[in-house]
Amino acid sequence: MAIDLYWGSGSAYCWRVRLALEHKGLEYRSHLLKFDQQEHQAPQMLAMNPRGQLPVLRDGDYVVFESVGILYYLDRKYPEPAIFGRTPEEGGVIMRVICEYQAYAEPSLMQLVRQLLYSRDPAWGEATKEAMAEAMHRAASEARTIERRLAQSDWVVGDKFSATDMVIYPDIRLLLRALATPAARELAARFLPLEINYPALGRWLDRVAAVVPDTAHEPGI
Ligand SMILES: N[C@@H](CCC(=O)N[C@@H](CS)C(=O)NCC(=O)O)C(=O)O
């Protein structure tokens, strides 16, 4: 059975799935859709995901969307190498850290990325400036939690590259890209240089890139 991946460039959520597919050595047909041409909203896409969002993965007749749902499916269907741990306890921690990350860190990171990389309105009003400073404060403090984990271990959870790393890695890469834009100069001072403020995080980025060299750098981002 063939795996089809429908994805869009510049999407951290899609990137997660590509990391998992590469790490598991799974072949798939890549369907790169254009957001600006609304290809993700085409009727055949809405039939697979009524929310009209990417990524969507089809494996034979089975369709799954939501990036973490896709990672979980892939791990159940193609267990080697395991990305949700080998024991219920490992799986519980991996899932818990993903849930914590999604609840407490991701909204702020994505707010910064959306505004700095994808907003069509580069002129910030005072309210936006304040919201961005708050988002940066939260993102920096959640990154500190991840930094502490990485200071103890090569991977965010446990001793292997896992779904947790796959969830967090694209977001951090996008955040760094966003903070490199001219509009982010002041905000970036809270976070950069990475080698000084978050050295373990910096080393982890290189480590992930060594494990999944083909998808570690997203050409569209
Ligand atoms: N929670 C979803 C988020 C997916 C998502 O927001 N995808 C964006 C791309 S980054 C999308 O398809 N946006 C198009 C739209 O909402 O029209 C996941 O984890 O897969």
Image (spheres, rainbow, N blue to C red):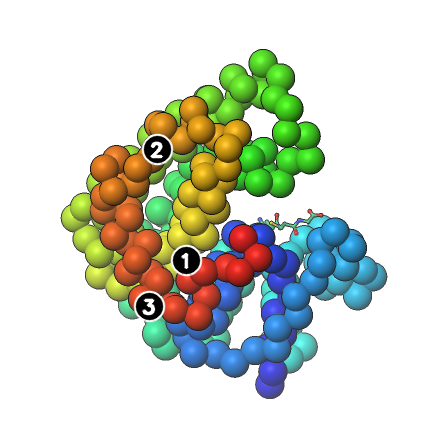
Which element is circle 2 on? loop
Amino acid type at circle 2 is: Phe
Residue 189 appears left or right of 44: left
Residue underneath mark 2:
191
Q: CA distance from mark 1 to mark 3?
A: 11 Å
Instruction: Give the crowd class for mark 1: few <14, some 14-19, many >=20 residues within 10 Å.
Output: many
Amino acid type at circle 3 is: Val
Report whether residue 85 is seen: no
Percent x, y for residue 21? 47, 71
Residue underneath mark 1:
166
Amino acid type at circle 1 is: Met
Q: CA distance from mark 1 to mark 2?
A: 21 Å
Q: Give the residue furthest to the right.
A: 43
Percent x, y for residue 103? 46, 38
Residue underneath mark 3:
211
Mark 1 and mark 3 residues within 8 Å of each other at the beta carbon: no
Residue 47 appears left or right of 102: right
